[in-house]
Image: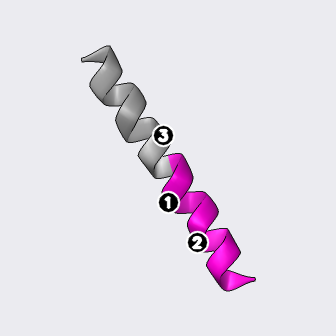
Amino acid sequence: MHGQKQKSLTMRLREIGVLNVCVE
């Protein structure tokens, strides 16, 4: 349970980072 929630956060953070790089 905890691992799944943490994975979701990491995935979202990674997606945001990728989007940020794409925007830049």
Left or right of 11? Residue 23 is left
Image quadrant occupied by the N terminus: bottom right
The structure residue drawn at horizontal position 54% and vertical position 53%, both measured from the top left corner, is: 11
Q: Position of residue 3 (x, y in %)?
A: 63, 80
Neighbourhood count class around disc 3 (C-alpha, 10 Å): few under 14, some 14–19, many 20 upward: few
Distance Cα–Cα, label 3 vs label 2: 14 Å
Dots 2, 1 in contact, CB < 8 A: yes
Residue 6 — which label?
Answer: 2
Q: Secondary structure at mark 1?
A: helix
Segment colored magenta:
1-12
Residue 8 among magenta residues: yes
Distance Cα–Cα, label 1 vs label 3: 8 Å
Image quadrant occupied by the C terminus: top left
Left or right of 10? Residue 19 is left
Q: What residue would you read off at disc 1?
A: 10
Of labels 3 and 2, earlier in sequence is 2
The quarter of the picture where residue 22 lies is top left
Residue 18 among magenta residues: no
Q: Position of residue 16 (x, y in %)?
A: 45, 38
Q: Residue furthest left?
A: 24
The structure residue drawn at horizontal position 36% and vertical position 39%, both measured from the top left corner, is: 17
Residue 15 — which label?
Answer: 3
